[in-house]
Amino acid sequence: MDVRQLRYFVAIVESGSISRASGRLNIAQPSLSLHVRNMEADLGVPLLFRTAQGVQPTEAGEILLRNARAIVAQFEEAEREIRGSGAEPAGEVRLGLPSSIAQVLGVPLVMAAQERLPKVKLRIAEAMSGYVLDWLRLGRVDLGLLYAFVEDRGLRSIGLLSETLHLFGPASDPDTAALPASGSPVPASLLAGLPLILPSPGHGLRDLLDERAAADGTRLSAAIEIDAYGAIKSLVEKGLGYSVLPAHAIRRETERGVIRAWPFMPAFLRTVHLVEPIDRPLSHAVQAVEKLCRETLRDLVRSGEWSGAQMRVSG
């Protein structure tokens, strides 16, 4: 049996006779009768009880009718979705962002989506990179931006942009008079001698800093570990230590003079990767949000809103 035969069978039962179904379907009556006989032969049971007034479904026919209606309805819904997939993107898209990226990308991306993708419901989930990666693995988000290249079998990473990292500390600290004036370059090896406030091991920024320290032959020791960038900045501002974040994440605080910042020499860069699943197809809406995300990132870099960043691939 196929969907066409199921449609014919539903029409025959609903019409009450093969002749009336023939007119409804615009199909010759002998052809419909042949389809019914073939279905009965395939299933090995009679499906219709024939009378002078028309036809009625047998017990087996009632079972087929109930299931045929559900199958035909589901198939028709699938046809509608497929035909609509090439039209305007619609549906829900879940995007996972680390806090430092959400701070600069979140609002512009939502505004752009409302203007250009009015039928797409964009949901942004914000967390540290490690949690965003877990969400991607579990399928809880459709796309994610991460600072680490992901080599999972079911995920693909695409480097989008590189950004500079800066050391930053409280506005004044007499105990670290050896630090140069704010804005002057410092070596990354300097981190080993400072009281640091960092995310815990396993998070993207901490792992990157530990790798850089190991390459310099040093080891970092965090005085405070906390997995929230906002809290890290507040603790630094209160004079409890120093930390490292991208330039855009501390721009407002440095402009207000509540913290000081130093670039690294040579420059300390990290890459922002778009991570997407490769073990399942991306919906039309997800593809549209991915494209819009690339374009919004490009605009933020070009305008200087994402300070200290440069695109790696065309958006």
Image (spheres, rainbow, N blue to C red):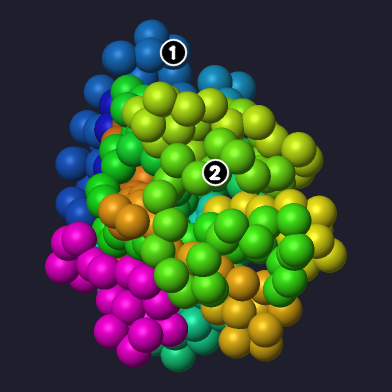
**Residue identifier under label 2:** 191
Q: Are marks 1 and 2 in contact (CB under 8 Å)?
A: no
Give the magenta-colored segment's residue range.
295-315
Find out whether residue 304 is within the magenta segment.
yes
Residue 185 or 105: which is nearer the viewer? 185
- Judge whether 186 appears above or below 184 on screen: above
Point out residue 213 in the picture as x, y percentages from the top left corner.
Answer: 45, 32
Residue 100's place in the image compared with 241, above or below, is below
Question: Is 176 displayed left or right of 210 in the figure?
Answer: right
Q: Residue 286 versus residue 176: which sits nearer the camera?
A: 176
Question: Mark 1: which amino acid?
Answer: Val
Q: Quadrant of residue 242?
A: bottom right
Residue at 71% x, 73% y is 171
User: Label 2 amino acid?
Assistant: Leu
Q: Is residue 251 left or right of residue 222?
A: left
Q: Nearer the viewer, mark 1 or mark 2?
A: 2
